[in-house]
Amino acid sequence: MSEAPAAVEVSLSAEEAEAVLEATAAYAAVVPPDRREPYDGLARAAAERLVPPERLDMLERICVLSLETGKARQLGRAEAERLLNTVYRRTPGGRERTNQAADVNRVLSQLRGRALKSARITSRLPGRYQLSLVVEGFELSIALEPEGLEVSSLQTG
Protein backbone atom coordinates (compact mmCIF):
# COMPACT_ATOMS: atom_id res chain seq x y z
CA MET A 1 0.00 0.00 0.00
CA SER A 2 1.20 3.52 -0.75
CA GLU A 3 2.27 5.93 1.93
CA ALA A 4 -0.21 8.74 2.66
CA PRO A 5 0.71 11.92 0.79
CA ALA A 6 1.62 14.97 2.86
CA ALA A 7 -1.14 17.50 3.41
CA VAL A 8 -0.77 20.61 1.29
CA GLU A 9 -3.18 23.41 0.59
CA VAL A 10 -5.74 22.84 -2.14
CA SER A 11 -6.52 25.65 -4.55
CA LEU A 12 -9.98 25.80 -6.08
CA SER A 13 -11.27 27.15 -9.36
CA ALA A 14 -14.24 29.50 -9.12
CA GLU A 15 -16.60 26.67 -10.09
CA GLU A 16 -15.04 24.26 -7.59
CA ALA A 17 -15.24 26.88 -4.84
CA GLU A 18 -18.94 27.38 -5.59
CA ALA A 19 -19.61 23.62 -5.41
CA VAL A 20 -17.70 23.34 -2.11
CA LEU A 21 -19.56 26.35 -0.69
CA GLU A 22 -22.95 24.90 -1.65
CA ALA A 23 -22.16 21.50 -0.18
CA THR A 24 -20.69 23.01 2.98
CA ALA A 25 -23.73 25.24 3.46
CA ALA A 26 -26.08 22.26 3.03
CA TYR A 27 -24.37 20.32 5.80
CA ALA A 28 -23.84 23.35 8.06
CA ALA A 29 -27.57 24.07 7.90
CA VAL A 30 -28.35 20.91 9.88
CA VAL A 31 -25.58 21.26 12.47
CA PRO A 32 -26.25 23.00 15.81
CA PRO A 33 -24.84 26.55 15.83
CA ASP A 34 -22.22 25.71 18.47
CA ARG A 35 -20.73 23.07 16.13
CA ARG A 36 -20.60 25.10 12.90
CA GLU A 37 -17.09 26.55 13.17
CA PRO A 38 -15.42 23.83 11.05
CA TYR A 39 -18.02 24.41 8.34
CA ASP A 40 -17.69 28.18 8.60
CA GLY A 41 -13.90 27.90 8.41
CA LEU A 42 -14.11 25.72 5.32
CA ALA A 43 -16.62 28.13 3.74
CA ARG A 44 -14.25 31.06 4.35
CA ALA A 45 -11.35 29.12 2.82
CA ALA A 46 -13.43 28.04 -0.19
CA ALA A 47 -14.57 31.63 -0.73
CA GLU A 48 -10.88 32.60 -0.88
CA ARG A 49 -10.35 29.62 -3.24
CA LEU A 50 -7.48 28.24 -1.13
CA VAL A 51 -8.07 25.53 1.48
CA PRO A 52 -5.17 25.33 3.97
CA PRO A 53 -3.89 22.00 5.35
CA GLU A 54 -5.77 22.42 8.64
CA ARG A 55 -9.10 22.54 6.73
CA LEU A 56 -8.44 19.55 4.46
CA ASP A 57 -10.07 17.00 6.77
CA MET A 58 -13.31 18.95 6.62
CA LEU A 59 -12.99 19.48 2.85
CA GLU A 60 -12.47 15.75 2.37
CA ARG A 61 -15.41 14.92 4.66
CA ILE A 62 -17.73 17.32 2.80
CA CYS A 63 -16.69 15.93 -0.59
CA VAL A 64 -17.07 12.29 0.49
CA LEU A 65 -20.43 12.85 2.20
CA SER A 66 -21.75 14.81 -0.76
CA LEU A 67 -20.63 12.18 -3.26
CA GLU A 68 -21.60 9.08 -1.27
CA THR A 69 -25.05 10.33 -0.26
CA GLY A 70 -25.97 11.84 -3.63
CA LYS A 71 -26.17 15.33 -2.10
CA ALA A 72 -23.77 16.68 -4.73
CA ARG A 73 -26.13 15.62 -7.50
CA GLN A 74 -29.11 17.09 -5.62
CA LEU A 75 -27.32 20.42 -5.23
CA GLY A 76 -26.01 20.84 -8.72
CA ARG A 77 -26.70 17.78 -10.82
CA ALA A 78 -23.81 15.95 -12.43
CA GLU A 79 -21.66 19.06 -12.69
CA ALA A 80 -21.44 19.55 -8.90
CA GLU A 81 -20.68 15.86 -8.56
CA ARG A 82 -17.86 16.13 -11.09
CA LEU A 83 -16.44 19.25 -9.43
CA LEU A 84 -16.51 17.79 -5.91
CA ASN A 85 -14.94 14.57 -7.16
CA THR A 86 -12.16 16.58 -8.81
CA VAL A 87 -11.57 18.50 -5.57
CA TYR A 88 -11.65 15.29 -3.52
CA ARG A 89 -8.93 13.73 -5.68
CA ARG A 90 -6.60 16.62 -4.68
CA THR A 91 -7.07 16.02 -0.94
CA PRO A 92 -4.71 13.68 0.92
CA GLY A 93 -7.38 10.97 1.16
CA GLY A 94 -8.33 11.35 -2.49
CA ARG A 95 -4.70 11.18 -3.58
CA GLU A 96 -4.28 8.07 -1.43
CA ARG A 97 -7.26 6.41 -3.11
CA THR A 98 -5.82 7.31 -6.52
CA ASN A 99 -2.47 5.81 -5.49
CA GLN A 100 -4.18 2.65 -4.24
CA ALA A 101 -5.92 2.22 -7.58
CA ALA A 102 -2.63 2.78 -9.43
CA ASP A 103 -0.91 0.17 -7.24
CA VAL A 104 -3.63 -2.41 -7.94
CA ASN A 105 -3.62 -1.57 -11.66
CA ARG A 106 0.16 -2.16 -11.78
CA VAL A 107 -0.38 -5.66 -10.39
CA LEU A 108 -3.33 -6.30 -12.70
CA SER A 109 -1.27 -5.24 -15.72
CA GLN A 110 0.96 -8.25 -15.07
CA LEU A 111 -2.01 -10.46 -15.92
CA ARG A 112 -2.46 -9.06 -19.42
CA GLY A 113 -2.56 -11.77 -22.07
CA ARG A 114 -2.86 -14.61 -19.56
CA ALA A 115 -5.77 -17.07 -19.52
CA LEU A 116 -8.34 -16.36 -16.81
CA LYS A 117 -9.17 -19.58 -14.97
CA SER A 118 -11.58 -18.20 -12.37
CA ALA A 119 -12.87 -14.95 -10.92
CA ARG A 120 -14.92 -14.66 -7.77
CA ILE A 121 -16.16 -11.93 -5.45
CA THR A 122 -17.00 -12.73 -1.85
CA SER A 123 -18.65 -10.49 0.70
CA ARG A 124 -16.58 -10.60 3.86
CA LEU A 125 -18.67 -8.05 5.79
CA PRO A 126 -21.21 -5.44 4.69
CA GLY A 127 -19.37 -3.06 2.34
CA ARG A 128 -16.20 -5.21 2.36
CA TYR A 129 -15.50 -7.50 -0.54
CA GLN A 130 -12.70 -9.73 -1.78
CA LEU A 131 -12.03 -10.18 -5.50
CA SER A 132 -10.15 -13.40 -6.18
CA LEU A 133 -8.63 -14.11 -9.58
CA VAL A 134 -6.86 -17.21 -10.74
CA VAL A 135 -4.97 -16.47 -13.90
CA GLU A 136 -2.43 -18.61 -15.69
CA GLY A 137 0.57 -18.49 -13.33
CA PHE A 138 -1.00 -16.20 -10.68
CA GLU A 139 -3.50 -16.24 -7.84
CA LEU A 140 -4.51 -12.74 -6.80
CA SER A 141 -6.84 -11.38 -4.11
CA ILE A 142 -7.87 -7.74 -3.98
CA ALA A 143 -9.63 -6.27 -0.94
CA LEU A 144 -12.38 -3.80 -1.87
CA GLU A 145 -13.30 -1.87 1.25
CA PRO A 146 -14.74 1.51 2.22
CA GLU A 147 -11.23 2.67 3.15
CA GLY A 148 -9.96 1.80 -0.32
CA LEU A 149 -8.57 -1.18 -2.15
CA GLU A 150 -5.37 -3.13 -2.02
CA VAL A 151 -3.79 -6.33 -3.24
CA SER A 152 -4.17 -8.55 -0.19
CA SER A 153 -2.54 -11.64 -1.66
CA LEU A 154 -0.44 -12.44 -4.72
CA GLN A 155 0.95 -15.88 -5.38
CA THR A 156 2.84 -17.09 -8.40
CA GLY A 157 3.33 -20.56 -9.67
Image (cartoon, rainbow, N blue to C red):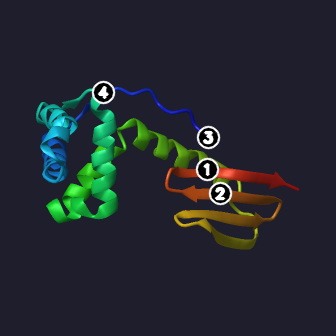
Q: Secondary structure at mark 2?
A: strand
Q: Which quadrant of the structure image shows residue 119?
A: bottom right
Q: Residue 57: x and y, percent?
A: 34, 37
Depicted 146 relative to depicted 6: above or below: below
Label 3 or label 2, whichever comes before in sequence order: 3
Tag 1 and tag 2, C-beta contact below 8 Å: yes
Crowdedness near tag 2: few (<14), some (14–19) or many (≥20) residues, C-alpha within 10 Å: some
Residue under the point 31% across and 57% down = 67
Crowdedness near tag 1: few (<14), some (14–19) or many (≥20) residues, C-alpha within 10 Å: many
Q: Residue 144: x and y, percent?
A: 57, 58
Label 4 or label 3, whichever comes before in sequence order: 3
Crowdedness near tag 4: few (<14), some (14–19) or many (≥20) residues, C-alpha within 10 Å: few
User: Mark 1 highlights which residue?
Assistant: 150
Q: Which quadrant of the structure image shows residue 60?
A: top left
Residue under the point 27% across and 32% down = 55
User: Mark 4 highlights which residue?
Assistant: 54
Quarter of the image that includes the N terminus: top right
User: Mark 2 highlights which residue?
Assistant: 142
Label 4 or label 1, whichever comes before in sequence order: 4
State the CA–CA distance, disc 4 to disc 3: 25 Å
Label 2 or label 4, whichever comes before in sequence order: 4
Query: At label 4, which amino acid type do we have?
Result: Glu
